[in-house]
Image (cartoon, rainbow, N blue to C red):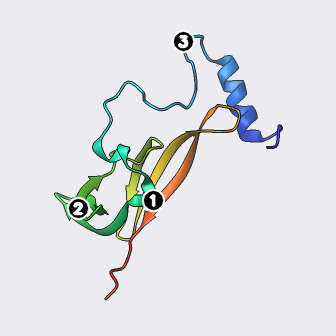
Amino acid sequence: MDPFNSQKLTLALKRDSASPGNMAIIAPEMARRKEALEMMPLDSMVMVGSMQKGGVPVALLRIDNLLYQVKVGNYLGQNFGRIMKITETEIQLREVVQDSSGDWIERPASLQLQEQRK
């Protein structure tokens, strides 16, 4: 890991200048109630479709032969993944994970639409 990584330096400077009440700039929301799909790993989920429901994009996920509807703002996976955008072919997530130094960082993730084989 590069000790002079600009992202790490920026986070360190912000952390030092923040008030003592702020423990971290990026951290998972530990106090909120977990959603059901946060107990399952992201790689066990398959996006099988999308639709509009009341003008809001909704994605269909298949997990263990069950279908789930998810929308922007829902949480997925075991790394505090939050849905940021749903398109016809993809779900874009923002995960919050710990890096090698123990700091919380954000990383993008996505689930692609899987075509059904005949």
- Would you name the residue on which mark 3 appears? 21
Of the image marks 2 and 3, the number of the one nearer the N terminus? 3
Above or below 101: residue 113: below
Q: What residue appears at the point 31 percent right and 89 percent down from the top-left corner?
A: 118
- Amino acid beneath label 2: Leu
Q: Residue furthest top?
A: 20
At numbered mark 1, what does the secondary structure look like: helix, strand or loop?
A: helix
Q: Position of residue 40 (x, y in %)?
A: 38, 49
At numbered mark 3, what does the secondary structure look like: helix, strand or loop?
A: loop
- Amino acid beneath label 3: Gly
Which residue is nearer to you in this view: 92 or 97?
97
- Would you name the residue on which mark 1 appears? 43
Q: CA distance from mark 2 to mark 3?
A: 42 Å
Q: What residue appears at the point 34 percent right and 70 percent down from the top-left corner?
A: 88
Rendered-image quadrant of the N terminus: top right
Q: Is residue 17 left or right of residue 116?
A: right
Q: What residue appears at the point 58 percent right and 24 percent down from the top-left corner?
A: 24
Of the image marks 1 and 2, the number of the one nearer the N terminus? 1
- Would you name the residue on which mark 2 appears? 67
Classed neighbour count for the residue bearing mark 2: other residues with Cα under 10 Å, few (<14), some (14–19), many (≥20): some
Of the image marks 3 and 1, the number of the one nearer the N terminus? 3
